[in-house]
Image: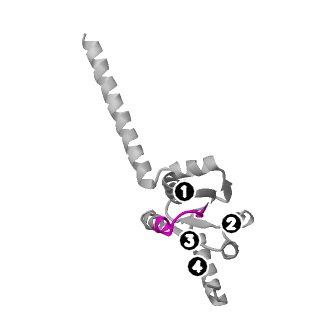
Amino acid sequence: MALHRNKKKDIIKKINDIAQKSLSIITADPSGITVNNINQLRKKSIQSYVKIYVIKNTLLKKSLINTNFYKLTDILTGPTLIAFSLKHPGSASRLFIKFNKKNKKFKIKTAIYENKILKENEIIDLALLPTHIEAVIKFILLLKEISLGKFIRLLNHIIRKSI
């Protein structure tokens, strides 16, 4: 079904607004993936503050003009499933990588973060970035380990002195 001009303008504006707020973008080829699987991916994306769209490349290219992700316009080909990370830069990458493990036909194409087109290993690194909560927990555990380690060394030193 063909879209009317006003509907296309609305889609372009909506995607552009989301791109302006996004921290990173990742694209994939959804060919061979069932609609049910895509819907499951969309449900998981809501929990991760990720927006997912299947959109025509011409509309997507127009949507990304004047955003940090304009470099994507040069490499868009074929069917495209695009995900925008809104809260954490690695959340969309993390979501796509987990989905790819269960659905081998799902091919991750590229990602953009901080105006840079990422390679496959960089996409994995982006997905492994800890969230704010994970980073705080790791920091607290590190502080706890450091202070506990000093205390144990002090006790060990006291025991050696007394012998």
* First in sequence: mark 1 vs mark 4: 4
| Colouring scheme, one of rainbow, by chain, secondary structure, one colour | one colour
Q: Which mark is residue 53?
A: 3
Tag 3: residue type?
Tyr
Q: Which numbered mark, 4 or 2, is in the foreground of this view?
A: 2
Residue at 26 percent across and 16 percent down: it is 159
Residue 152 occupies which quadrant of the picture?
Answer: top left
- The residue that mark 1 highlights is 93
Q: Which mark is residue 78?
A: 2
Using residue 115 as the reference point, say whether residue 85 is left or right of it. Answer: left
Q: Are marks 3 and 1 in contact (CB under 8 Å)?
A: no
Please identify the quadrant where the C terminus is shown: top left
Tag 4: residue type?
Lys
Tag 1: residue type?
Ser
Q: Is residue 30 magenta?
A: yes
Q: Nearer the viewer, residue 4 or 121?
A: 4
The percent coordinates of residue 28 (x first, y second) are: 60, 61
Note whether 30 is above or below 152 in the view shown.
below
- The residue that mark 4 highlights is 14
Q: Spatial distance from mark 1 to mark 2, Cα to Cα?
A: 20 Å
* First in sequence: mark 3 vs mark 1: 3
* First in sequence: mark 3 vs mark 4: 4
Note whether 22 is above or below 136 in the view shown.
below
Magenta residues, start to end: 29-39
Q: Nearer the viewer, residue 30 or 149?
A: 30
Q: Spatial distance from mark 3 to mark 1, Cα to Cα?
A: 14 Å
